[in-house]
């Protein structure tokens, strides 16, 4: 396998620095400065590198959500109740968060690819576990392995895009969020399309594993590239030691703390909504639309996430706090329409509320996320992005399990309604937190 560290084993040298002195891996050195130690090292163009990182992030999130449309099938086959179904969804997040918290800073020292490449191989192993599962515990093990893989790669992939596009932080944030939300939205649809045969798990997950392993090939061949920054010749080398890789406590960034907290709060709230949608959308669609179709459940699950991803790709972020506040308010309004659809039996309200909520979330969260990433210290970007994603992903765990427990005791409609009410109040609270301050008028 190709060397995964930014240091490498070659003799690459830059004016005033050595490859082993790099704290960050990346990808910015002028191509003419590179001295490749072997012709098998592929000195790919920056655009190709961006595409590989984006593809890795997208594929990882697609795989984590392939199972959404087949949860009802699994429930029937293994006798699951709603708590077990939401528990399967939450196992993935419970495995992801500790890994993201413990090793999120590793890519700042070892290099981005040092985490992304093994994470992809691990995700393929999780696919195989899930595809061949014969019990709840094997399903849970497969989900846990997928969560570990995403935890390894999430902060590293986002930081890699920031390194590759240093002059375009908005584009880097757009790609990070669009690949994340897009993967979550596309995953259920692909899962529904490929799970129609006798083996609803085998086909989608094995095909996904093959796609992941195919992506490993170009990632392994790409030559790691250094940051293009000059260092004084007398500067001591920056050497990574085991002490640098010890688990660290999550810390708020020293600069841009307000931007970080706003993005984390909006992300926690909106990802709680996403998590409940993904775990319960098949049951909601079957109840409201009176159809057991997997594709229908997948489309309902994808409406919210797909709208969010589309807006993040097409609409530029804004620093206008009023627009951001209106975005969070729109997410609350979308939740209200979804609840109204369940009580009135009106499918149109479900579709309108999902699209409205997703589009408004995309505007608000992308703008806050872009501001938070732009304020981060480049040398701690992997660590600080990981801390941000830990908070965001917490929204996809505990609330989902709580809604599953409420569903078992009180039924689907009261559980979803209660959650939607609390989430809407949290959205309105975030809208109040980000609204522009009033300017005092003089006499």
Image (cartoon, rainbow, N blue to C red):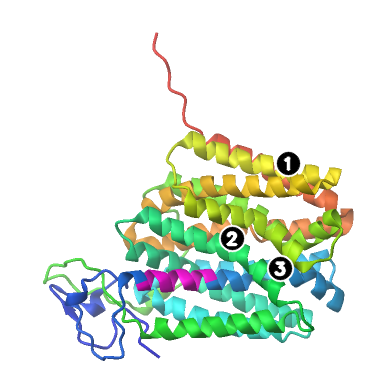
Q: Earlier in the sequence, mark 3 or mark 1?
A: 3
Identify the residue at image location x=50%, y=45%.
Answer: 262
Q: Which mark is residue 393?
A: 2
* Magenta span contains residue 238: no
How far from the left and from the top, in percent, is residue 287?
85, 56
Quadrant of the image containing the N terminus: bottom left
Number of marks drawn: 3
Mark whose residue sits in front, 2 or 1:
1
How far from the left and from the top, in percent, is residue 211?
54, 81
Against 55, is 171 above or below?
above
Identify the residue at image location x=82%, y=64%.
Answer: 82
Highlighted range, magenta: 48-58
Identify the residue under disc 1: 336
Q: Nearer the viewer, residue 112 or 45?
A: 45
* Magenta span contains residue 53: yes
How far apart, in angstroms, are the residues tagged by discs 2 and 1? 23 Å
Q: Secondary structure at mark 2?
A: helix
Identify the residue at image location x=82%, y=47%.
Answer: 342
Identify the residue at image location x=50%, y=69%.
Answer: 57
Callout 2 crowding tier (Cα within 10 Å): few <14, some 14–19, many ≥20? many
Against 400, is 129 above or below?
below
């Amino acid at each position: 396998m190709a060397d995964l560290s930014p240091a490498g084993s070659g003799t690459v040298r830059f004016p005033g620095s050595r490859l082993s002195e790099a704290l960050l891996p990346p990808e910015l050195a002028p191509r003419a400065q590179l001295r490749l130690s072997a012709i098998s090292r592929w000195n790919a163009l920056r655009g190709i590198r961006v595409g590989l990182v984006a593809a890795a992030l997208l594929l990882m999130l697609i795989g984590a959500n392939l199972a959404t449309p087949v949860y009802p099938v699994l429930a029937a086959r293994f006798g699951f109740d709603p708590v077990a179904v939401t528990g399967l969804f939450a196992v993935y997040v419970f495995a992801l968060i500790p890994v993201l918290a413990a090793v999120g800073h590793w890519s700042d020292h070892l290099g981005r690819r040092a985490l992304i490449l093994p994470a992809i191989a691990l995700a393929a192993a999780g696919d195989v576990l899930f595809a061949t599962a014969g019990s709840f515990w094997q399903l849970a093990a497969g989900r846990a392995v997928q969560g570990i893989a995403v935890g390894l790669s999430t902060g590293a992939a986002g930081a890699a895009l920031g390194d590759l596009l240093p002059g375009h932080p908005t584009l880097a944030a757009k790609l990070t969020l669009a690949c994340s939300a897009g993967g979550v939205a596309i995953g259920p649809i692909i899962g529904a399309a490929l799970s129609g045969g006798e083996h609803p798990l085998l086909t989608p997950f094995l095909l996904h594993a093959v796609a992941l392993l195919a992506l490993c090939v170009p990632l392994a061949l790409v030559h790691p590239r250094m940051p293009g920054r000059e260092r004084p010749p007398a500067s001591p080398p920056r050497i990574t030691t085991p002490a640098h890789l010890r688990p660290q406590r999550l810390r708020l960034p020293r600069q841009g703390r307000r931007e970080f907290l706003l993005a984390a709060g909006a992300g926690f709230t909106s990802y709680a909504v996403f998590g409940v949608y993904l775990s319960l959308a098949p049951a909601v669609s079957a109840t409201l639309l009176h159809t057991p179709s997997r594709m229908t459940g997948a489309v309902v699950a994808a409406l919210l996430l797909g709208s969010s991803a589309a807006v993040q790709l097409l609409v530029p972020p804004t620093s206008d706090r009023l627009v951001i506040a209106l975005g969070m308010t729109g997410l609350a309004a979308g939740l209200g329409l979804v609840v109204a659809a369940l009580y009135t039996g009106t499918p149109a309200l479900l579709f309108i509320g999902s699209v409205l909520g997703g589009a408004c979330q995309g505007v608000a969260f992308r703008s806050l996320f872009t501001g938070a990433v732009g304020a981060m210290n480049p040398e701690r970007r992997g660590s600080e992005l990981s801390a941000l994603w830990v908070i965001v992903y917490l929204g996809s765990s505990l609330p989902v399990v709580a809604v599953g427990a409420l569903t078992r005791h009180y039924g689907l409609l009261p559980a979803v309604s209660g959650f939607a009410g609390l989430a809407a109040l949290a959205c309105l609270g975030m809208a109040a937190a980000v609204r522009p301050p009033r300017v005092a008028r003089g006499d």
